[in-house]
Amino acid sequence: MSELADGIQRYLAELGRENASPHTVRNYASDLAQFLEYFSPPGAEPPAPSAVDALAMREWLTDLYDRGLDPISIRRKLAAVRSFFQFLLREGAVAANVARWLRTPKAPKRVPSVPTAEQTNALVDGVALDKFERPHPERDLALFELLYGCGLRISELVGLNLEDFDFSERWIRVRGKGRKERLVPYASKAAAALAKYVSARTARPRERAVFLNHRGTRLSDRGARDIVKFYARMISGDASIHPHSLRHAYATHLLSDGADLRAIQELLGHARLATTQKYTQVSLTDLMAVYDKAHPKARKARG
């Protein structure tokens, strides 16, 4: 195995020890495999990490542009390589993180697609009706109530343990990105769904995970996504709705009902207020749509 390939393997193992989300590990593994492939010409060994200089990194970045990748994909690949070289720098395998010298492409500003409060409630209420003969309806309803009622990331949801809940005060200790902890309240409907599920929950011995699969062990990230996709397709007829759609809906509907932006930032576990502010753009877009439809000046302008 080449020195570069060995370094990538050590880095991915380190991510696992740091409890990075499976989604992050999968993406970084894929991006770094492509990075290794670029620096592995046919019949030749890739260079040692210490031999990869700024010029070689710029040529790699140019290749990403030449292949027509969008800025979001390039930013992710660049983040993976920067993190990898930072790991090598800590190990003493390289003298500098040459990936940090590359210019990050600007990401287009995108307003997230968010289901309305009516659409979201219809979806969650549809799960509660239990019309689809699912094997674990109590689990599925509790999952939806916490995703929408608490704005959790899917990795945060499947990572919950029984001891993370204060059932009397209705608080959850959530471990977010970077293992940062925050307390998130949950409401009466989520409490009722959770109580019903916990009483019916059948776990393997010593299993502390709240959300379980059919084997009685922790539900995976992919398993939770499949549950959301199934109900979204069957109830809403929209398979594009995913767990993060419910997180977006949680934040947007709180903001629309007058919640303070900084309070929403705390509830979502955003490190930067700017990340939370994108929901302001969603609300403004909704307001403009209402204005265009209802205001007489807007109707005259269209006419």
Image: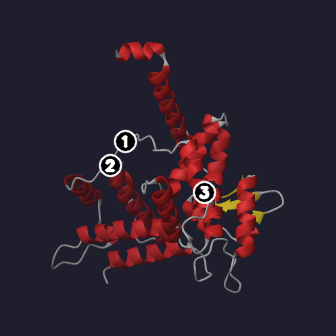
Q: CA distance from mark 3 to mark 2?
A: 29 Å
* C-alpha distance separating marks 1 and 2: 8 Å
- Residue type at mark 1? Pro
Q: CA distance from mark 1 to mark 3?
A: 27 Å
Of callouts 3 and 2, which one flags the residue occurring earlier in the amino acid sequence?
2
- Residue 156: x percent and y percent? 60, 63
**Residue farthest along the front direction in this orientation:** 131
- Residue 159 position within the rendered picture, expressed as x and y whole percent measured from the top left: 62, 68
Depicted 125 relative to depicted 201: above or below: above
Q: Which mark is residue 147?
A: 3
Residue 199 in the figure: left or right of residue 131: right
Question: Which residue: 58% across, 75% down?
Answer: 135
- Circle 2 SS class: helix
Q: Quadrant of the C terminus?
A: top left
Q: Picture coordinates of residue 88 (x, y %)?
A: 43, 69
- Mark 3 or 2: in front is 3
Which residue sits furthest bottom?
A: 205
Q: What's the amino acid at mark 3? A: Leu
Left or right of 184? Residue 251 is: left
Residue 215 image-quadrant placement: bottom right
Query: SS at mark 3?
Result: helix
Residue that appears at 23% across and 78% down: 45
Name which quarter of the figure residue 300 lies in.
Answer: top left
For the residues bearing labels 1 and 3, Cβ distance under 8 angstroms? no
Residue drawn 75% across the image and 59% down it:
191
> Is the residue 76 above or below the residue 19 in the image?
above
Which mark is drawn over residue 108? 1
Q: Which residue is mark 2?
A: 71
Number of marks present in the image shown:
3
